[in-house]
Image (cartoon, helix red, strand yellow):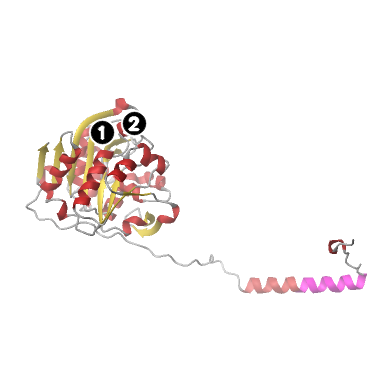
């Protein structure tokens, strides 16, 4: 049987070959001419995506209440409740129907005892307190450095959140949106869209050593809102930390100083580097909270350049003694 694929083109004589070649060259020259006329050095324009800005998540609170609280004890729920009550009570910050986003530090594939991530018991206590305030949704998220599923699982935070009635939001590549950070170093940057969908944001960082910035505290915890090449920001880490703190103004900050990673941060790994301090610091001024927290790492504010930079930008005071601070023992 003869196949259609076995057919051969008839041979061309010299005259036919010259004629066909001339036609082919003419078409090619025409295409080249039109390509030259319409050539542009401008790249192909893409549809412009929306650029977001952060809302201010803070709420006004009377000066009658403390601006910072320091609670010590071993019962996390009681420590947190006593701290927030001195600040005015959770209902001053979270209102019925609010969509609340909680931002702990869940950057590393480490167990709770290693103090590389926020204590899961504290995250659980924050979720429960927001439930009492009748928040419509209580969401917990972070942009982890290690695999996020392992980080949330091994840190104990995933289980703690689910058991206390919250929900974990894992951030995929499609969950970042262009956001104008309005900073000196940070301009337009990919940010987790979950922050633009929330009514209130609670920062729940941990006190720990950092090999480059000397410490990871409240302001540094905002690295976890970013996508993109975050390691590039380490070239001027102090400015980038302050840019982040200026962009994200949380409703409330609750610092975990229950287990403090004193050396080999931010990842840790060795239990001998961890100090048990059984303390939480809560408040409205992240500069003051960070300044107070330095003592757990045997640092002074003069040792940490971003503290003074943040103060100069008007983000808070490094003199925590100058604000209304209440110490509580539970």
Q: Find residue 116 and report its horizontal and vertical position in percent.
A: 32, 36
Chain part drawn in magenta: 13-26
Q: Residues under labels 2 and 1: Cα distance?
A: 11 Å
Contact check, label 2 and label 1, Cβ < 8 Å: no
User: Is residue 308 visible from the viewing direction of this image?
Assistant: no
Q: Is residue 285 left or right of residue 112?
A: left
Q: Residue at x 73, y 72 (%)?
A: 29
Instruction: Write down the residue under mark 1.
Output: 260
Pick the quarter of the image with the N terminus.
Answer: bottom right
Q: Nearer the viewer, residue 209 or 21?
A: 209
Instruction: Write down the residue under mark 2.
Output: 264
Q: Find residue 51 and report its horizontal and vertical position in percent.
A: 37, 63
Compared with 182, 271 (above or below) is above
The magenta stretch spans residue 23: yes
Q: Residues within 10 Å of mark 1 (few under 14, many from 20)?
A: many
Q: Nearer the viewer, residue 71 or 183?
A: 71
């Amino acid at each position: 049987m003869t196949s259609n694929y076995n057919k051969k083109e008839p041979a061309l004589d010299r005259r036919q070959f010259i004629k066909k070649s001339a036609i082919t060259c003419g078409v090619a020259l025409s295409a080249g001419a039109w390509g030259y006329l319409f050539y542009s050095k401008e790249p192909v324009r893409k549809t412009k995506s929306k650029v977001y800005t952060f809302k201010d998540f803070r709420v006004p609170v009377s000066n009658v209440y403390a601006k910072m609280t320091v609670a010590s004890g071993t019962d996390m729920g009681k420590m947190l409740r006593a701290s927030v009550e001195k600040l005015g009570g959770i209902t001053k910050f979270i209102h019925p129907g609010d969509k609340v986003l909680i931002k702990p530090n869940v950057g590393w594939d480490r167990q709770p005892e290693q103090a590389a991530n926020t204590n899961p018991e504290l995250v659980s206590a924050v979720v429960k307190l927001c439930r009492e305030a009748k928040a419509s949704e209580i969401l917990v998220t972070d942009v982890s450095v290690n695999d996020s599923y392992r980080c949330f699982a091994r840190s104990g935070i995933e289980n703690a959140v689910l058991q206390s009635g919250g929900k974990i939001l894992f951030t995929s590549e499609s969950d970042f949106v262009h956001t104008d950070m309005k900073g000196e170093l940070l301009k337009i940057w990919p940010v987790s869209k979950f922050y633009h969908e929330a009514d209130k944001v609670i920062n729940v960082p941990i006190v720990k050593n950092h090999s480059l910035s000397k410490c990871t505290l409240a302001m540094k915890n905002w690295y976890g809102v970013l996508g993109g090449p975050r390691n590039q920001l380490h070239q001027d880490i102090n400015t980038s930390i302050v840019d982040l703190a200026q962009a994200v103004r949380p409703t409330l900050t609750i610092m975990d100083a229950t287990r403090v990673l004193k050396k080999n941060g931010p990842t840790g790994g060795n239990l001998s580097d961890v100090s048990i301090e059984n303390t939480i610091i809560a408040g409205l001024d992240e500069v003051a909270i960070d300044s107070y927290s330095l003592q757990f790492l045997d640092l002074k504010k003069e040792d940490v350049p971003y503290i003074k930079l943040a103060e100069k930008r008007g983000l808070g005071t490094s003199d925590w003694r100058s604000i209304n601070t209440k110490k509580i023992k539970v």
